[in-house]
Amino acid sequence: MLRLPFLVALALLTAFGLGIGSAVGMLDASSGFGAIRLGPWAAFPEAQTSAADPYARSHRARAGKLLLATAEGLQFQADVDEDGARLSPRCTYAMDGLTPPARFWTLYAANRDMEPLTPAENLPAAFNAWNVLRRPDGSFRVLISAEAQPGNWLAIRRDTAFRLVLTLLDTPTAGSSGVLEIKMPKLTRVSCS
């Protein structure tokens, strides 16, 4: 007698649970519709525009953050290195090369929710176009590690998973035609402890 209502309730709970779980999973995804991959770097140039897909709009609404319009800039994120291995806080990485043309750029480490990670007090937590040390040809090398490094050192926490966020502000590469032709800095693993 109670078997039929129990089975109906179980089916409804399963359907709603899977539906809500898949929607939350899509909102938390860091790649998806409209993603452009350049080596380890990924960007979503249409995420802030009126042409954004429904998932990008929902992701933007859920994050509750003010995003850059296409003409203002472009944000790249890297979860993996050049070999496709996930970034590990126990390893040291080198970001080498030049950034694409931009009036200004920033680089910082963030957690999975894209919130900036702050290492211990007085350690370098970010770099930008004005404070990075450059080579004579204009290129630079930033070492990303939990242990102190010579030169440009971006400190990360040893116990927290991270991703790198490179934001290009007022850049011609934000236009729809030039994004695929730009050259991003290389991100290679130097060593692991």
Image (tube, rainbow, N blue to C red):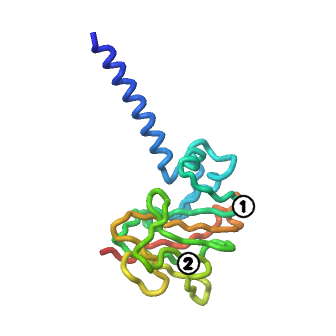
Per the image, the residue denoted by label 2 is: 97
Q: Height in image: 98 above or below 48? A: below
Checking the image for residue 71, the label placed there is: 1
Q: CA distance from mark 2 to mark 1?
A: 24 Å
Quadrant of res 10: top left
Q: Height in image: 26 above or below 141? A: above
Name the residue rendered at 42%, 30% in the picture: 16
Which amino acid lies under the numbered mark 1 shown in the image of this protein?
Ala
Q: Height in image: 141 above or below 14? A: below
Which amino acid lies under the numbered mark 2 shown in the image of this protein?
Gly
Mark 2 or 1, nearer chain start: 1
Q: Report x, y in % for residue 12.
A: 39, 24
At label 1, counting other C-alpha atoms closer than 10 Å, the crowd grade (few under 14, some 14-19, many 20 or more) is some
The answer to which of 97 and 154 lies nearer the viewer is: 154
Name the residue rendered at 68%, 46% in the picture: 51
Element on which disc 2 rests:
strand
At label 2, counting other C-alpha atoms closer than 10 Å, the crowd grade (few under 14, some 14-19, many 20 or more) is some
The residue sitting at the bottom extreme is 136
Front position among marks 2 and 1 = 1
- Left or right of residue 87, residue 7 in this image: left
The answer to which of 4 and 101 lies nearer the viewer is: 4
Name the residue rendered at 36%, 72% in the picture: 91
Q: Report x, y in % for residue 52.
A: 64, 47
- If the image is split into quadrants, where does the C terminus sit? bottom left
